[in-house]
Amino acid sequence: MAEGTEVVARNKKAQFEYDIEETLEAGLVLEGSEVKSVRQGKASLDGAYCQVDREGEMKIHGMYIKPYEEAGPFGHEPRRNRKLLLHDQQIGKWGQMAEQEGYTIVPLSLYFRDGWAKLKIGIAKGRQKHDKRQAIKEREMERRLEREQSDYNF
């Protein structure tokens, strides 16, 4: 991330469940109470995904933003679909890529950059169960090697 960014939420499962092929930064349309709640860190990307709708707009589905307590009865709906701000060419390209078999658009992180809410999204292909097991084995081997090297250096 560049300077002036404050990461609010990460989708940790996305790195494990999918092979991320390409990433993109998108703006996010939020209501006032949603911005305040996100700034407090009360947002979750678990189970969220992005999709292009019939009007040609990309929206994020399943993202949870806890209602802001101070908003009272004028708060927001926690799991509403939120519009992403992208150029038409980007929406078209990513929409076509997502229509291919096994591909989806997943949110990777939610952050503020220069005061604006941004969402890092990625075009991803789902991993098979054996691919996930292989990733776990590789990660464990790297950890073990680092541990052994640190023990050896002392």
Image (cartoon, rainbow, N blue to C red):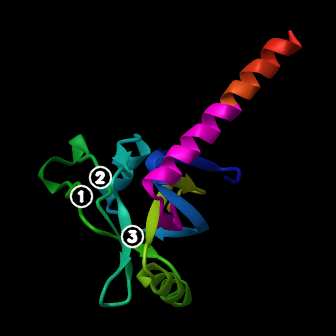
- Magenta part of the protein: which range? 119-142
User: Vertically, is 67 above or below 149?
Assistant: below
Which residue, given by chain and number where applicable, does mark 2 sit on?
64
Which residue, given by chain and number where applicable, does mark 3 sit on?
50
**Comparing marks 1 and 3, which lies closer to the viewer?**
3
- CA gap between label 1 and label 2 equals 5 Å
10 Å neighbourhood of mark 2: few (<14), some, or many (≥20)? some
Place of residue 16 in the rendered image (x, y in percent of width and height, measured from the top left): 50, 49
Q: Which element is circle 1 on?
A: loop
Amino acid type, residue under disc 1 in the picture: Arg
**Comparing marks 3 and 2, which lies closer to the viewer?**
3
The numbered mark at residue 79 is 1
Amino acid type, residue under disc 2 in the picture: Tyr
- Asked if disc 3 and disc 2 are in contact, CB closer than 8 Å, the reply is no
- Asked if disc 1 and disc 3 are in contact, CB closer than 8 Å, the reply is no
User: Vertically, is 81 above or below 92?
Assistant: above
